[in-house]
Amino acid sequence: MAYITTDKDIKSLIKFKDIRQINTGNINNMRSGGLIMCIVNYGSAEIENYYAENLINYSNSGAAFILSENASLIVRNLEINKIKGNSIDGLLLNTYNSNTVKFSAYNFTLSNLYQRSDRTTAALLWLEEKTNVYIEDLIYITTFCNVEINGLEVNNFFSKTPVEFIQMNVGGDMELTSIKFNKLKIFNINSQGTLIRILHGKLLLTNSTIKNIHKCNLDNSCKNFKDNDNSLIQTNILRTGLGCKITIENTIFDNIYGENGFRSLPDTTITLTNNTFSNSYFKSGLIHIDNEYIDEVISGSFLIYNNNFDNIKSDYGSVINIKNLFKNSNTRINVNDSIFKNNVASKFGGVIYSSSLYTNYSVSFNNCIFINNYAKIGQIAFSLNKDSEPKFSNIDELREKKGLISTNPTKLILSNNITNSISLLSSDLFPSGVLCNIYDDYNNIISFNTDFSNIEFNEFMFFGIESNDTYNVELKGQTQSYCWGDSCEFPSVKIIGNPGKYKIRLKINTFGKFFQFKDNYVDIPVEVKTCNDPYINQYKESNKIKSCYKPKCDFGCNTGSCVNINNKNNPMIKGGSVDFLIIILVGLIFNILYSFLLTVQRTTTRCYLIYLLNNIVYMF
């Protein structure tokens, strides 16, 4: 609409009031934005009661305002409906070559924003160094900036690429670098990407509402191009750099979906006071901690006071998900006077999940209330063991109700009351129905999924059967199996052994969805008895250990008796008796006569003899 420039010595102010601007831009090969106004040098302007609709630049920047050098702009009562651009700068404001750029806005409403660039972009503002912004009744920033936004409402934003809706990328003095939001309203952000990214500095967010963010993750309909920075997509509320200070107060976060909510680096402090987080899904938890990778240690200090966490869903740890912690980690999560209600983890840890041995040094819950939280294991908390679980001020009360606090499996115990050793003969089957159960540190039995349609191969816990003396004992049959339901059953393997006392061990080999634990085996004493009559003791199923068995016929003998399958000295079995030799000799004589008659002239009598001798030979 306007291009304004003045020299340093000319002090003038241009005012615009009661203006409607509709259908601006949409021209092929437009080189830049400033679809409402571009102010450069020392230009200064005021806008009041301004309505704009359909501001479009498909070729380049779609910024409504462009300010550079020492430009100044004050806006009151501004409403923009539908603005589209195709660049990396902000759709509302873009600054460049800044010296003392000033931008102030009061009573601000934006709707239907579309950023079509294939590159990572700024959503709302792109501000360079030495820029001062005040917006009353988001952002790309680079060195010594103070931004204050009061009463901004954004509804329905879409970007073609994953985008950081508000980004603050500055250095320098922490006190000189801050961004403040009050009464911020952000609704219906349909593109993936972090809402707020602060790489350095301070953030204050108060009295705000953020709702319906990344709902495309519900049905996997997000259509953003892929980005090399996975954390840009994975983090959905706040992502920080090193040493940031974040304060969020009296703010509602509702209907937010994605990988995780907060992702911060070491020496960052995030203070959450009187906020509500509700009706959201974070696959890896609202607060995600992972110290595993040196190049990006996800850490920080979280000070949480009087917050409500209601109906947050996740796979592991709906509110807090701790994957890995260093022993000397500076991660701290202190939760005070907060309410956790109706939170669900589809697998472990309804409220908090931890797979670290050092969580007890870093996480505490003080005077918190837990109502109707759920997970398959650990309705409130899941930890590796008792010693590593978070500190709860009411831990005794929570432990009274079975299943609220659970741990990784810690031991394997026989469920059968076997006090003496199992006695058997060599080549006998191990008794069926011998079971053992897996328990956590609270003596809760660990159960396994029994629905084949809803279980993955890597969730199976496989075990093997072995002997403590492989020289004197061999196991034949299925020595590998898996736990099922709430137990692990010894398979009925055949035990071939020399007389003596041994131990048969069931040992977990793979731990499925759990972590490895020390007491992962159980032994059963077995005694192989001496083989006495009427049993036969000889090599049958092993080349080095004899089996002990009774003769057995697969088909019952009507008039005879079963004999040893390996009775080599019986002359009837060896075919060495005199009667048997006579029968063979007579058969050979008839065969010779038959062969001779085949060589002489045939007569009727000789033909009969040939036929008779031929059939007699087959009888023998």
Image: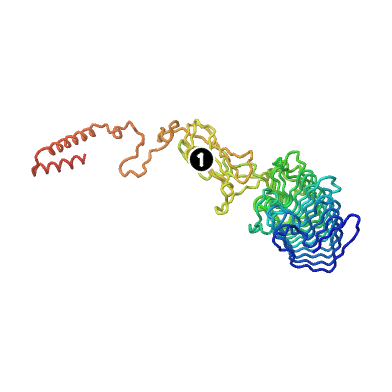
Q: Nearer the viewer, residue 505 or 434?
A: 505
Across the whole image, how many numbered discs are drawn on residues? 1
Residue shown at 89% from the left, 54% from the top: 8
Q: Quadrant of residue 86?
A: bottom right
Q: Nearer the viewer, residue 158 or 43?
A: 43
Left or right: 130, with 327 as reference point: right
Q: Is residue 502 visible?
A: yes
**Rendered view: 426 above or below 251:** above
Residue shown at 34% from the left, 37% from the top: 563
Q: Amino acid at mark 1?
A: Thr
Left or right: 195, with 528 as reference point: right
Residue 498 x/y as whole percent? 47, 31
**Rendered view: 391 above or below 542:** below
Q: Nearer the viewer, residue 564 or 102?
A: 102
Please say which color scheme the image uses. rainbow
Left or right: 541, with 86 as reference point: left
Pick the quarter of the image with the N terminus. Answer: bottom right
Residue 34 x/y as whole percent? 78, 60
Q: Is residue 236 visible?
A: no
Q: Quadrant of residue 225?
A: bottom right
Q: Describe the element under mark 1 as helix, strand or loop.
A: loop
From the image, tell me which residue sits under label 1. 479
Residue 370 x/y as whole percent? 74, 54
Pick the quarter of the image with the C terminus. Answer: top left
Question: How many other residues sit within 10 Å of disc 1, few (<14), some (14-19) or many (≥20)?
Answer: some
Q: Nearer the viewer, residue 430 or 377?
A: 377
**Rendered view: 263 above or below 532:** below
Q: Quadrant of residue 17?
A: bottom right
Residue 425 x/y as whole percent? 46, 36
